[in-house]
Image (tube, helix red, strand yellow):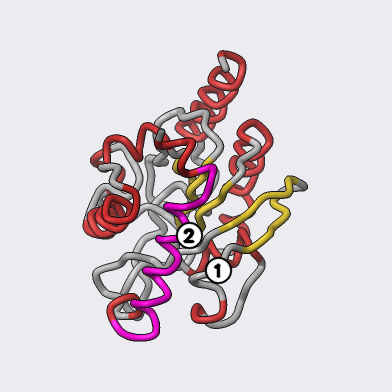
Amino acid sequence: MTDRLSSIEAIQARIAACRRCPQMIGPPVHGAPVTGRVLLVGQAPGPREADFGRPFAWTAGRTLFRWLENATGADEERVRASVYFAAVARCFPGKARGGGDRRPDPGEIETCGEFLRAEVEVLRPDLVIPVGTLAITEVTGHRGRLVDVIGQTVPVTLFGHETEAIPLPHPSGASTWFKTEPGAALTARALNLLARHPAMRDALA
């Protein structure tokens, strides 16, 4: 456990020091150095996360942690202490010209992918929770409709590591997908799968 913790802390030190993507708005954001077997992969920090120094610290986070507490009984503090929070990109990408947050470009995704690969190699997660379309694509390879992947447990091979993924829609306040059908029912199904998954139950025990 000590070796795993030291390895994760070393990766997070590299993340914190990274300034390789000129369009990204730092500083980079990472979660606590958790060494459990559940890995949550978000898309990228919003404009406020760097102020708080942790992922999902603003509006989307309130929705996400409400979902998880309703499903598992674990509050935000317990989830953050039990689940490792990573992301496809670790810095805020900035705003898109048409509105909303800019989607990280392939080079930025590849750069941060080095950190995600290292985290997976250390943690060897039994469960990965990709949150949002970009994270779902990067973790599972799925590029189709959310209705075809939310509410399912998906076998995946992530950086050579065989594991399972339970995707969630992004809990953005601007999204209506999880508030209307079939998105609402599929999101509830996904959260039920999470609550019953052995790795999640062990992490929160």
Q: Is residue 193 magenta?
A: yes
Which residues lie in the magenta part?
A: 180-199
Q: Residue 4: where, in percent of width, then height? A: 59, 22
Q: Which residue is mark 2?
A: 193
Q: Is residue 79 magenta?
A: no
| Image height of 29 relative to 17, above or below | below
| Quarter of the rendering containing residue 28 | top left
Q: Residue 107: where, in percent of width, then height? A: 62, 58
Magenta-drawn stretch, dominant element (helix, strand or loop): helix
| Image height of 129 relative to 80, above or below | below
| Image height of 19 relative to 151, above or below | above
Residue farthest along the bottom direction in this orientation: 181
Report the side of 173 relative to 6 (left or right): left
Q: Mark 1: which secondary structure?
A: loop
Q: Residue at x 49, y 72 (%)?
A: 150
Alpha-carbon distance for marks 1 and 2? 8 Å
Q: Which residue is mark 1?
A: 152
Crowd around label 1: few <14 · some 14–19 · many ≥20 (10 Å)? some
Say the numbered circle drawn on residue 102: none
